[in-house]
Image: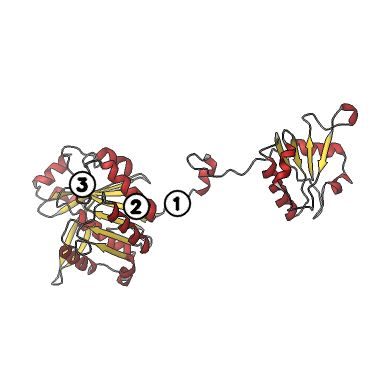
Amino acid sequence: MLTTLAPQNLGNRDAGIFVAATTNFDGAGKWKDDYSAFFAGKKVTILPDNDEPGEKHALRVAASIYPHAIGVKIVRLPGLQEKGDVSDYLKSHTDSDLLAEIQKAPRWHPPIEDCGLLVPIMSFLKDVPEEIDWLVTGVIQRGANGVFCADAKGAKSFASLDMALSLAIGVPWLGFDVPKPTRVALISREDTPGLTAWRTQHLLLGKRGDTNQLQTNLYINTGRQSKELMLDNEEEVIELMSVMKQWQIEFAIFDVFNVMHDNPEMRTILRQLSRVQAEVGCCIGVAHHYNKAGSTSMTQRLRGSSAIAGWAEWLIGLTLVDEVQKIRRMEFELKAAQPPDAIGFKIHERGIDKVLTLEREELATLSAIPASSAAARYMKR
């Protein structure tokens, strides 16, 4: 039942207060939007039947009338039996009781929906995850873009390839947990295909876990698969995205960044990567060279540092700190959480099969090692 109320309180005829009550033809579920214009400028109270069809009907009518009326209330009367309505309520209550229920009922508003550029904060917070969804625990958040950065020969290709293998198999990487296997695409455009294949094969010898998962979880592009793959070539990017969608890629590594475009405007290329991320539904890691000496900040040492600072949500920086022992320092920056402490690591090659492994080394042991020029520079910082 629908009741329109004048702005004054409900009262008797002598007070000049009038109430119009109506229902729509054929009952619940039969409301037509054409009816709503007749409620323009009115205060509308909806008194639904106490059952599921009555509730659905009340919400449908409220949504239809809302753009026309001054205000809308849905008043759910207390004490009604199943399928009861306002006439049942008035058998045991006065009009003053009904007025009291109407007065204390809140105004009805349409449900808040996301509407594009701006959303209400409480709507935004409905989907807050209970905890961070990590690709690599404490290092890379699932869905986040970032950079592997190092000087030339800094082992960024080794580190990113080793991470790709660990992610695909679902085994720890340099002591950091990998919660579950991930579908990875490695776009290797700096090293020769033969060198990439050799490294992959020998790093695999040092991995524990179900390597059978690699066939469905790790995909690679080198010079064998395409002569070039440029991020500023629209046809090549579209083809890449199509294949990545086909294989349902979750994490894509581009090694190295600066050989995959000729555009000097860094922001343009980063927008292209963001487009790949959005259309494929993956996160992206790029291997990138340091080229600004003298700064201790990873971000500031990168080419296009100001653009990358806004784009990257994690950084993994590699520095050779002892040229004799070949020990490297790996440091981290990330936006998702407090970054882990820097670690030391070394690439080991063992046995006649030349098994390759990346293993942690204590950075503290550097003080006991004859300092090379690189190590000395590090220790002075």
Q: Is residue 97 left or right of residue 243?
A: right
> Marks 2 and 1, how far apart in space?
26 Å
Q: Specify the amino acid type for callout 2.
A: Val
Quadrant (top left, top right, bottom left, bottom right) of the C terminus: top left
> Marks 1 and 3, how far apart in space?
40 Å
Residue lying at 25% horizontally and 56% vertically, measured from the top left: 160
Q: Alpha-carbon neighbours of circle 3 within 10 Å: few (<14), some, or many (≥20)?
A: few
Residue lying at 28% horizontally and 40% vertically, measured from the top left: 307
Q: Is residue 174 above or below residue 329?
A: below
Nearer-the-camera pick, 232 or 325: 232
List x then y, in percent, for residue 57.
72, 50
List x then y, in percent, for residue 85.
82, 49
List x then y, in percent, for residue 205.
22, 69
Which of the 4 quarters of the picture holds residue 311? Answer: top left
Name the residue tied to disc 1: 131
List x then y, in percent, for residue 161.
24, 60
Q: Is residue 166 above or below residue 100?
A: below
First-in-chain label (2 vs 1): 1
First-in-chain label (1 vs 3): 1
Task: Find residue 276 and name its label.
Answer: 2
Name the residue tied to disc 3: 262
Q: Is residue 172 left or right of residue 156?
A: right
Q: Alpha-carbon neighbours of circle 1 within 10 Å: few (<14), some, or many (≥20)?
A: few
